[in-house]
Image (cartoon, rainbow, N blue to C red):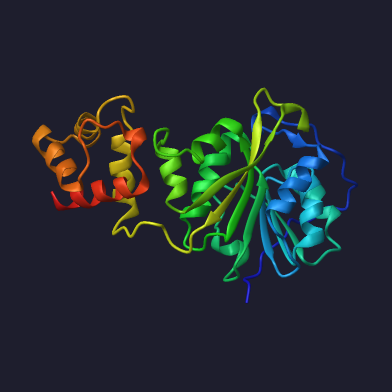
Amino acid sequence: MNPPISPLPHDGRPSRPSRAKKSLGQHFLVDRRILSRIVGAADLSETDTVVEIGPGRGLLTGELSAKAGRLVAVELDRDLASALSAKYEALPHVTVICADGREIDIGSLAGESSYKFVANLPYYAASPIIRRFLEATHSPEIMVVMVQREVAERMTASPGHMSLLSVAIQLYGVPKIVCKVPPGAFRPPPKVSSAVLRIDVHPRPILELESETEFFKVVRAGFSAPRKQLRNTLIQGLSMEPGRSEKVLETAGIDPTRRPQTLDLADWGRIYEAFSQH
């Protein structure tokens, strides 16, 4: 049974469209063709519970509320949240919460139910929010999100172009770019292009790790100087003695002269295990 969530109270005043607030990185989606691609990528049915972060004026919210069995929309802007609460107050399966997606208690949103995460995320908060939900004890089945195109490309990168972000995403799921989105799909238009990204989330991280915190400590150290050789980045990032760095990489079966962006998840897993042993 889902825990109760208190919806945002409505004061009874008529709602008006809110102007985009630069301080909150607001760019409202207006292109319904892109809207259809987002909703289609989520494979929604009337049995689905959906969490939406940053609904804004609610264009996507309207589509989600029509297709999902339950929708929880989390909006940081109180004016927008109030307007959405008024719009959907007659629909018991829609709950609007005024809160920050980077801080909200994820467990309170869907309870024990499986859920899907669908959102047009503000650029400045996209990566932290996505990682937070992926790393949560109760993570979503899939995530379909609008993010900056460059960020989507980093998340989906393959060995040769990997980064800390791509490792952090691909440990928990399989990301794929659904479509690219031009600035003109938004009002006001942003200065950069966007992309719709779908992440099929693994039931558990793809690597068996004793400590995900320690794993990312090693990966973060490896990417501390991406253009340098691994033996040097580990020395620098983990304050290791040169001999220990060489020993760790030798145990992991990794050439110490390789660059961090060339490694895949399995390589990082072996380095983490070797680091734990030495």
Does residue 176 appear to the left or right of 75 in the view shown? left
Q: Where residue 87 appears, x then y in whole percent?
A: 85, 53
Q: How many marks?
A: 0
Q: Nearer the viewer, residue 91 or 66?
A: 66
Q: Is residue 23 above or below residue 96?
A: above
> Residue drawn 55% across and 58% down?
106
Farthest top residue in view: 191
Whether residue 102 is visible, yes or no, is no
Q: Is residue 90 above or below residue 164?
A: below
Q: Nearer the viewer, residue 103 or 175?
A: 175
Q: Quadrant of residue 54?
A: top right
Q: Nearer the viewer, residue 45 or 26?
A: 45
Q: Quadrant of residue 218?
A: top left
Farthest left residue in view: 243
> Residue drawn 16% across and 43% down?
248
Does residue 205 appear to the left or right of 185 in the view shown? left
